Image (spheres, rainbow, N blue to C red):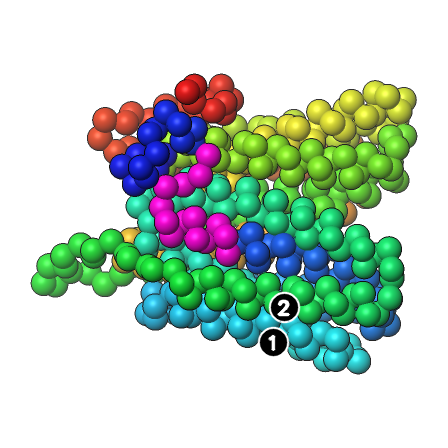
Amino acid sequence: MADQTSSPVPPARRRNIAPGSPIMRRLAMITLVDTFGDGLFLTIGVLYFTRVVGLPAGQVGLGLTIAGGCGVIAGILFGRIADRWPAKPLMIGLLVIEAVGMLAYPMIGSFWVFLVLACLVGFVDRGVSAVRSALIARSVAGPERVRGKAFLRSVTNVGIGAGSGVAAIALQADTRAAYVALIAIDAATFVVAAALLSGLRVQPPAPAARTAGARPPRSPWRDRRYLVFVLLNSLMSLQFCILEIGVPLWVVRATTAPRYLVSVLFILNTVLVVLLQIRASRGMEEPLRASRGFRLAGFLVAASCLAYGCARGMPPAFAVVALLVAGVAQTLGEVLCSAAGWALSFELADPDAPGAYQGVYGSGASAAMMIGPVVITESAIRFGMPGWAGLAALFALTGALLVPVIRRSQLTPPAGRPARGFRLGDLPVDAG
C-alpha cells in the first residue's frame, strides 16, 4: 500500500482507491488519455485497413504480427536506453513520433506502406511502455509501484472502454471520413499525453552510495532467476488471448449460448478488473506472497479453461452459466497474475538497471501476445475439450512452478511483514 504520509487525506477516508504518489496520479491522467485513443483505434483499426484501405484480411494479420515482433525488440531496446537517458524526455519524444505515425495512416495505399507504418507505430508504442515502467521503477517507492501499476491498469480499462464506445459512431457511419476522424483523434491523444507528461515533476529517490570497486549493473540476460520468471509470466500471459480470440470463436462456433454473450463477457471482464485490480495488488511486493498469488492465478485460469470447454453441447441456459463462471474465474486469475507479475518484475530486478529489466519483462509479455492467437486457435478452437484441457494443464503447471523458483532464491520479505499465502478473502476493500 502507499505510504500514508504521502497524502493529507486521513488513512480511514482514502479507502485504498488511488495511489498517493503525485507521479502516479499524473501518469494515470496520461494513461486515461492515451488508452482512450487506443480504444478508438483497436475498435476500428482492422475494419479501416480492410474496408477503407482495401487490404486483404490475411495481409493485415501478417502485418500486425510483424509489427508485434518489432514491439518485442522495442521493449528490450528502449528499456536499456531508459537506463542511460532521462525517461521523461525520452517518453515525450516517443509519444510525438507515435502521433506522427498515426497521422500517416490515412495515406496508406499499399501493403508495404501499411507494413512500414504498422511496424513504426508498434515499435514506438512498446518503447513507450518500457520507458514508462522504467520511470515508475526509478521514481516511485516499492509498495507504491505495484499499487500504482494496478491503478494504471484499472484506468486503462476505463479508457479503452470509453474509446470503444465512441468508436461505435464510426462503425455505424462506416465511411472513410468517420474512420479518418477517429484516427486523427487517436493521434491527438498522444500529443495531449506528451503535454501532460511535460508538466510532470520527476523527483527520483536519491541513489544509494556506491563503494569503490562495486560491480556494474547486472544484465537481465545473465540473471537466470529473472529469465525463468519472465518465461513463466509470458506463458501465463497467453490467457489474455483466450478472451480476445478464443472466447468469441468458441461461443459462436461451439456453444448454444446467444452471440451477445461475447459482449457480456467482455464487459464483465472490464468491470471486474476495474473493481478488483487495485485490491489484488495489496501485499504483492513480498516476493513469496506474490508467487503464491501467481500460483492461485494459474489454478483459476485453468479452472476457467475447463469451464469454457464444458459449455460445448450444453443446453443454452447451462451453457450461459458455464461461460459466465469461466469468465469470472479467468478475470480473478487475470488480476492476481497481473499484480504478482508487476511486483516480481520490480522486486527481482537489479535496482541499478530497472529499464533493462522492465524491457525484458514487457517484451516477454508482448511475445506471448504475438503467438497467443495461434496457440489458442490450434488448441482449444481446433480440438475442443481436449485442447481446453491442455491449456488448463499449461496454466496450472506454469503457476505452480514459480513458487519453488522464488523459494530457492531465498528472498525475504521486508522486516515486520511476514509472507503468507494469498487468499481470495484478501480482495475486499479495507473497512473504513
Is residue 405 found left or right of 397 in the rendered image? left
**Other residues around mark 1 within 10 Å, as few (<14) / some (14–19) / many (≥20):** some
Query: Toward the viewer: 213 or 260?
Result: 260
Residue 314 to residue 402: above or below = above
What is the x, y in percent for residue 419? 33, 26
Inter-mark Cα distance, 1 to 2: 7 Å
Kindly state the secondary structure of the residue where label 1 is placed: helix
Q: Are marks 1 and 2 in contact (CB under 8 Å)?
A: yes
Query: Toward the viewer: 400 or 243?
Result: 243
Dot label at residue 100: 1
Residue at the location (43% across, 19% down)?
Answer: 431
**Other residues around mark 2 within 10 Å, as few (<14) / some (14–19) / many (≥20):** many
Quadrant of the image for the C terminus? top left
Residue 283: say if magenta: no
What is the x, y in percent for residue 326? 70, 28
Quadrant of the image for the N terminus? top left
Residue sticking out furthest to the left: 212
Tell me which numbered mark, 1 or 2, is placed earlier along the sequence: 1
Q: Which residues are magenta?
A: 17-30
Residue behind mark 2: 187
What is the x, y in percent for residue 133? 43, 55
